[in-house]
């Protein structure tokens, strides 16, 4: 990844809706070059997805519930933790899976419409996966910061409109 | 009730100082709502959190008393190290540096310590609105030297030399410049330095935008051969560290001059705010990565904004530093004030009329691109619409 690749990736991370034209002007390249760089970043799997970070608390629909589940497992012969993790991350309810050091092995993030739905998933699907020893479910109550974005910081532009 | 004759009481100095042109526009713009502002001369970032934390800690630990007159020794040491590392300048923390209440107070101290009544001070214009009035407050005579649009607002040595008389004592330089964003490279500074040495003058170099240099690394005139002994360096934390409200700047220069300024400082200010000084120490110690990030972001927005201005027909040279673009509005046949006022009323975009910055500013507007990309794009759309009706 060269300097311009990195700069473009960072710009997109901060504002994926900027037009290619604007990005081209910002980094002083031709539009075609920027398109090429973005395409190659996508192909290399450096840019994975373009996503809006939404504060569901503010959106007037029921955004559902999210839970973080600590999972202890016995790693499987030959495929270790990776095989168990795959069995878990393939479930559509699962939004994220991380291998952790410390008190438990996998951190599994699950989203569902209701608490009941999440509870059902944990007891009937997750817990019954071979080699899952135990689960501890924590429901998420409020998001303060997500993916580097602070929710409701109350941080408006506090500068006067005109200053020296 | 008896009438008080205010005319009688106001000092001549106070009466003779003109209110800043920015002030008038400030009042107009700040009364309106939902304005997209390109009129702001300060960063759109808030101060880095670790700096704020350091200030909280200073309060919790009871550092709420005066510091040494010249500032916390640790901070002066950090400033000295920073100037060496960034700009190859060497100043003794104990005798050649004073921490001030903003670069503003540093400018005031420098003029007060160096100007006698009748002394002439050369100031290239367009420039920051405070210089000329502060010279007058010190009894001096500000002499404007125009740095014109044709030379991308760079100060040319012959323009400077033409204004030198036997009363000239000081030359004020500000690069990167507010409001034009102009910068001078080492060769260009070298030529200015030749003129300064030939006429045995001193330089006050306001380098508060030094870190915000986009195309070439900033060079301080104090680092040019034989110039350190005739340069007073002014800088501060407001711009590069996004700390305008902390009111913290500094002066660095030859001991004799700095000690004279310290005498004035100890009577008029005692010391800069101690809590803010603890924040600044953190900024210099652990905050440089944040500066780099902010500079990258300003550079990207400059590239976008200047190109967009030219595309919609606002001719604009590419500024090498600071966060201002200074496009020409000549072809509209409006004065800078009219342009700014009509743009504000019709399209709710605030810019500052170039005329408030002195000679050479008329026919230009100052646009600060310390604004979000979103707002910059909207501002361009609105200015485009505004221009389309008139060209
Ligand atoms: C060129 C220049 N010098 C000095 C200052 C004042 O800086 P401070 O906030 O450190 O007083 C400004 C602020 O706009 C400026 O543009």
Image (tube, coloured by chain):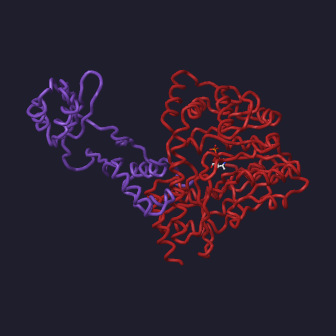
The hue used for chain B is: red
Q: Is residue A163 visible?
A: no
Task: Work out whether B55 lies above or below B301.
Answer: above
Chain coloured purple in the rendered structure: A
Q: Name the residue: 69% across, 56% down.
A: B127
Give how far across and how far down residue B337 sits, in percent.
61, 66
Q: Nearer the viewer, residue B227 or B123?
A: B227
Tell me the quarter of the image containing the C terminus of chain B. Answer: bottom right
What x and y, as percent, mark residue B228?
79, 40
Q: In the depicted view, which residue is nearer to us: B16 or B274?
A: B274
Q: Quadrant of residue A151?
A: top left
Outermost front residue: A78
Q: Give the answer, above or below, for where A120 lies relative to B314.
A: above
Q: Is residue B27 left or right of residue A51?
A: right
Rendering coords of residue B327 (x, y %): 60, 65
Give residue B224's position: percent from left, percent from top.
77, 45
> Does residue B225 appear left or right of residue B302 in this picture?
right
**Residue B134 in view (yes/no):** yes
B265 sits to left or right of A70: right
Query: What is the total number of numbered labels drawn onto the structure image?
Result: 0
Looking at the image, the residue that sits furthest to the right is B166
């Amino acid at each position: 990844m060269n300097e311009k690749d990195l700069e473009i990736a960072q710009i997109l991370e901060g504002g994926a809706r900027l037009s290619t034209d604007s990005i081209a002007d910002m980094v002083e390249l031709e539009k075609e070059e920027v398109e090429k760089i973005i395409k190659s970043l996508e192909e290399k799997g450096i840019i994975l997805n373009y996503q809006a970070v939404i504060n569901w608390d503010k959106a007037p629909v029921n955004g559902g519930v999210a839970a973080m589940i600590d999972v202890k497992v016995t790693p499987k012969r030959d495929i270790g933790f990776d095989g168990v993790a795959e069995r878990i991350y393939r479930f559509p309810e699962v939004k994220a899976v991380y291998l952790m050091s410390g008190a438990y092995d996998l951190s599994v993030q699950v989203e569902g419409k209701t608490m009941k739905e999440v509870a059902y998933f944990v007891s009937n699907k997750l817990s019954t996966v071979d080699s899952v020893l135990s689960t501890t479910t924590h429901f998420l109550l409020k998001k303060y910061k997500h993916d580097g974005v602070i929710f409701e910081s109350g941080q408006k532009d506090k500068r006067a409109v005109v200053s020296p | 009730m008896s009438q008080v004759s205010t005319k009688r009481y106001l000092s001549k100095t106070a009466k003779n100082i003109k209110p800043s042109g920015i002030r008038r526009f400030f009042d107009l713009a700040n009364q309106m709502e939902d304005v997209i502002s390109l009129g702001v001369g300060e960063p759109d970032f808030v101060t880095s959190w670790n700096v704020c934390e350091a200030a909280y800690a200073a309060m919790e630990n009871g550092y709420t008393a005066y510091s040494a007159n010249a500032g916390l020794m640790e901070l002066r040491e950090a400033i000295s190290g920073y100037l060496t590392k960034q700009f190859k300048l060497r100043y003794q923390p104990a005798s050649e540096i004073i921490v001030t209440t903003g670069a503003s107070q540093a400018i005031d101290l420098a003029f007060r310590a160096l100007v006698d009544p009748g002394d002439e001070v050369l100031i290239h214009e367009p420039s920051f609105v405070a210089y000329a009035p502060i010279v007058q407050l010190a009894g001096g005579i500000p002499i404007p030297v125009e740095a014109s649009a044709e030379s991308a607002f760079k100060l040319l040595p012959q323009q400077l030399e033409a204004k030198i008389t036997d009363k000239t004592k000081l030359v004020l330089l500000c690069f990167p410049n507010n409001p034009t964003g102009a910068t001078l490279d080492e060769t260009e500074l070298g030529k200015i330095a030749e003129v300064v040495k030939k006429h045995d003058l001193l330089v006050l170099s306001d380098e508060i935008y030094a870190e915000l240099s986009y195309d070439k690394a900033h060079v301080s005139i104090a680092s040019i051969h034989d110039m350190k002994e005739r340069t007073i360096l002014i800088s501060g934390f407001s711009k590069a560290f996004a700390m305008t409200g902390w009111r913290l700047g500094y002066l660095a220069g030859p001991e004799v001059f700095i000690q004279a300024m310290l005498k004035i400082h100890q009577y008029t200010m005692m010391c800069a705010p101690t809590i803010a000084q603890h924040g600044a120490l953190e900024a210099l110690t652990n905050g440089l990565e944040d500066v780099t990030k902010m500079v990258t972001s300003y550079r990207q927005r400059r590239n976008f904004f200047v190109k967009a201005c030219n595309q919609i027909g606002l001719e604009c040279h590419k500024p090498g530093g600071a966060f201002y673009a200074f496009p020409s509005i000549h072809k509209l046949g409006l004065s800078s004030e009219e342009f700014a006022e009509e743009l504000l009323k019709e399209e709710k975009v605030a810019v500052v009329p170039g005329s408030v910055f002195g000679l050479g500013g008329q026919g230009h507007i100052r646009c600060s691109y310390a604004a979000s990309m979103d707002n910059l794009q909207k501002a361009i759309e609105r200015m485009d619409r505004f221009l389309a009706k008139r060209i």
